[in-house]
Image (cartoon, rainbow, N blue to C red):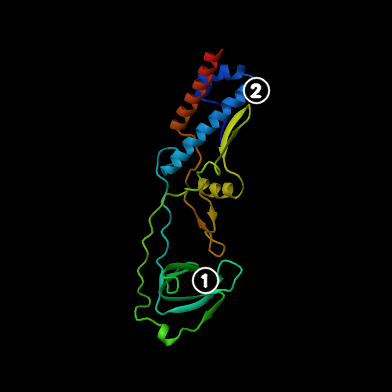
Amino acid sequence: MVDIGADDLGELERFAGGILASMQPAERRSLFRKVARTLRTGQQKRIARQENPDGSRFAPRRRGKDPVPGGYAVKFLYPSGGSGEPRLVLMHSWVRQGALLTGYDVRAGGLRSFEWRKVVRWLPVGEGEQNKGAGRIRRPTIRQRAMFRRIRRSGVMLANASDQEAWVGFAGRVAAVARIHQLGLFDKPSANAAEIRYAMRELLGFSAQDRAMVLEATIDHILAGADDA
């Protein structure tokens, strides 16, 4: 959580602390709500740039292991996604990447991925269903997307205030995940995987740009109130 309290405002206190102290609680709460939203916007933009508060770049994500190619066709029953019967899957060329089996699904007519643990039953592959090019599938090119695209959304990154402070942070499971990256802690990438140490990536932090944005929002609020008086 990034926290700006009325008693610990730094530069903001030097410029506007006296005026803040003289405000009524309701007015101060209104100001801190604006500050919280301003701060959240700054955090979201910085995360989108993949930067820590000091301007350094986030550590890149780990590169996954190369998939293991399957040198034969496979055939199995797999849950259809509804309450109906499992569907039949026949894959000629495929690769195994962690818990996923990815390859050309003959019946679907395209590249598909399936979880090994969800396979209902493996079936024998007939001689006519084998293919000469099994195992020669090329690894799909996956576009490297920016990390934390979901975590920076306004519905996930929360912003709120009281008459004493403004804050930006996360809650529940998202907070636990954010803390792992924020502090560079150990965690399991998946339920059956071994623990690894994640690189420290400061999702929340108070940068010089954030400080300037908060100060500007506060002064704008005070000037607007003076104009209305």
Crowd class of label 1 (few under 14; some 14 to 19; many from 20; radius 10 Å)? few
Q: Which mark is residue 102?
A: none
Q: Position of residue 83 (x, y in %)?
A: 61, 68
Task: Tell me which numbered mark, 2 or 1, is placed earlier along the sequence.
Answer: 2
Q: Quadrant of residue 186?
A: bottom right
Residue 173, relative to residue 160: is it above or below?
A: below
Kindly identify the residue that appears in the image at 65 percent across and 22 percent down: 25
Could one spot residue 7 in this view of the protein? no
User: Which residue appears farthest toward the bottom when viewing the image?
Assistant: 127
Query: Which one is in front, 165 or 184?
Result: 165
74 on left or right of 141: right
Seen in the picture, residue 28 relative to 122 is either above or below; the reply is above
- Quarter where residue 27 is shown: top right
Measured as percent of width and height from the top left, residue 59 is found at: 42, 49
User: Which picture quadrant has residue 108?
Assistant: bottom left
Q: Name above or below for residue 147 compared with residue 12.
A: below
The residue that disc 2 covers is: 25
Residue holding disc 1? 116
- Residue 73 percent coordinates (x, y): 42, 79
Q: Identify which amino acid the numbered label 1 is placed on.
A: Trp
* Amino acid type at mark 2: Pro
Camera sees residue 11: yes
For the C terminus, the image quarter is top right
Q: Report the front residue among 68 and 105.
A: 105
Q: Quadrant of the N terminus?
A: top right
Secondary-structure class at tag 1: helix
- Name the residue nearer the viewer: 215 or 55: 215
Disc 2 element: helix
> Within 10 angstroms of label 2, few (less than 14), some, or many (20 or more) residues?
some
Residue 154 versus residue 12: which sits nearer the camera?
A: 154
Residue sitting at x 50%, y 55%: 197
- Residue placed at 53% from the left, 33% from the top? 37
